Image: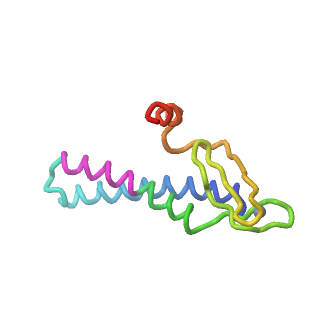
Amino acid sequence: MSIRWHLRFMVAAEMLGFLAAEGLVVYGFVAGAFGQSLAYAAVAMVVAGVVGVMAPRLLFRKLIPARCDQAGCSGRALVVSENPIVYSCKACGKSVETAVFEGGGPDHHSDRDRFG
Ligand SMILES: [Zn+2]
């Protein structure tokens, strides 16, 4: 699929993964899986949120490549950076910078600078 659609599917999969994971926790809580403990349920919500987002993100980044949009090339374009998300083609080396930011947010780079 093209980079544009790959990006849309990846973001959609992350949101669905998040909602599905949180839905499972809510279902588990209602079903008594946490012994009606709000503390356990809160921890489970956090863990489920991270896993629910990271699992589809890794899936789309490592296992499902986008198709390079360079004319005459249909190589595998993978995400190589996330602030913003940048795709890089393994075949021709073309990079495509998108307008989508993920990960550490605007302070990401300054944190990295501060700690070396
Ligand atoms: Zn290419």
- Residue at position x 37%, y 57% in the image: 21
Q: Point out residue 72 in the picture as x, y percentages from the top left corner.
A: 86, 66
Please state the horizontal and vertical placement of residue 27, each as a whole percent of the image: 29, 59
Whether 33 is drawn above or below 110: the answer is below
Q: Which residue is located at x 19 percent, y 50 percent?
A: 40
Closer to the camera in the image, 48 or 62: 62
Q: How many marks?
A: 0
Q: Which residues are magenta?
A: 39-51
Residue at the right extreme, as displayed? 72
Residue 40: say if magenta.
yes
Look at the image and say whether residue 8 sits in the magenta stretch: no
Judge from the rendering whether residue 79 lies leftward or rightward of residue 30; answer left or right.
right
Residue shown at 47%/36% (left/top)?
A: 116
Write the residue at 55% across / 65% down: 62
Place of residue 65 in the rendered image (x, y in percent of width and height, measured from the top left): 63, 65
Query: How was the colour assigned to the protein in this rendering?
Result: rainbow
Query: Where the N terminus falls, by quadrant?
Result: bottom right
Residue that lies at the very extreme toward the front in this rendered image: 116
Q: Where residue 108 sits: x, y (%)?
A: 50, 36
Question: What kind of secondary structure does the magenta stretch mostly adopt?
Answer: helix
Q: Is residue 94 left or right of residue 32?
A: right
